[in-house]
Image (tube, rainbow, N blue to C red):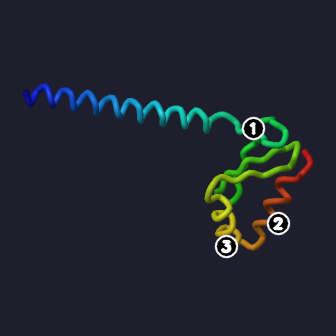
Amino acid sequence: MSDALDERRKAAEEQFFEQQNKAALERLKQRSEARKSPITGKPMKQQTYMGVTIDYCEDSKGVWLDSGELEEIIEASKKDSSYFGNLFSGLFKKN
């Protein structure tokens, strides 16, 4: 009887991890696709400043941050006071 219970437990465990893996793969797929600007609907570019990756819309000049990224930028600016000047001048350069 314990063999049957062990097999059932093992099957349930494998099913659980299979579902977890599918969910993780879906999250990775969503991250790899370019986010669309909520203003223009066009794909945004990702740019890294002081170790923080931000999403930037070239058409609307909008910048979107994920949870916690603003705090990271603030901490980085405390270490380098010229950070904000460099950040915004780099974003709005004409190509």
Q: Which mark is residue 36?
A: 1
Residue highlighted by disc 3: 79
The structure residue drawn at horizontal position 66% and vertical position 67%, both measured from the top left corner, is 76
Q: Amino acid at mark 2?
A: Gly
Residue 44: image location, x then y, percent: 77, 41
Residue 85: give its label: 2
Compared across the picture, whether 1 is left or right of 84 comes to left
Q: Give the residue furthest to the left.
A: 1
Which is nearer the N-term, disc 3 or disc 2?
A: 3
Per the image, label 2 sits on a secondary structure element best described as: helix
Q: Residues within 10 Å of mark 1 (few under 14, many from 20)?
A: some
Tag 1 secondary structure = loop
> Residue at position x 79%, y 60% from top?
87
Please state which of the two labelled residues, at mark 3 or mark 1, is closer to the viewer. 1
Quarter where residue 90 is shown = bottom right
Measured in 3D between alpha carbons, the distance from the residue under mark 2 to the one under mark 1, in whole angstroms, is 26 Å
Where residue 63 sits in the image (x, y, percent)? 78, 52
The residue type indicated by label 3 comes to: Lys
Q: Which residue is drawn at the image coordinates 54% and 37% (left, top)?
A: 27
Disc 3 and disc 1 in contact, CB within 8 angstroms: no
The image position of residue 88, as x and y in percent, is 83, 59
Mark 1 belongs to which amino acid? Lys
Q: Quadrant of the C terminus?
A: top right
Give the left or right position of residue 93, taking residue 16 as reference: right
Q: Quadrant of residue 81?
A: bottom right
Q: Position of residue 75 (x, y in %)?
A: 64, 69
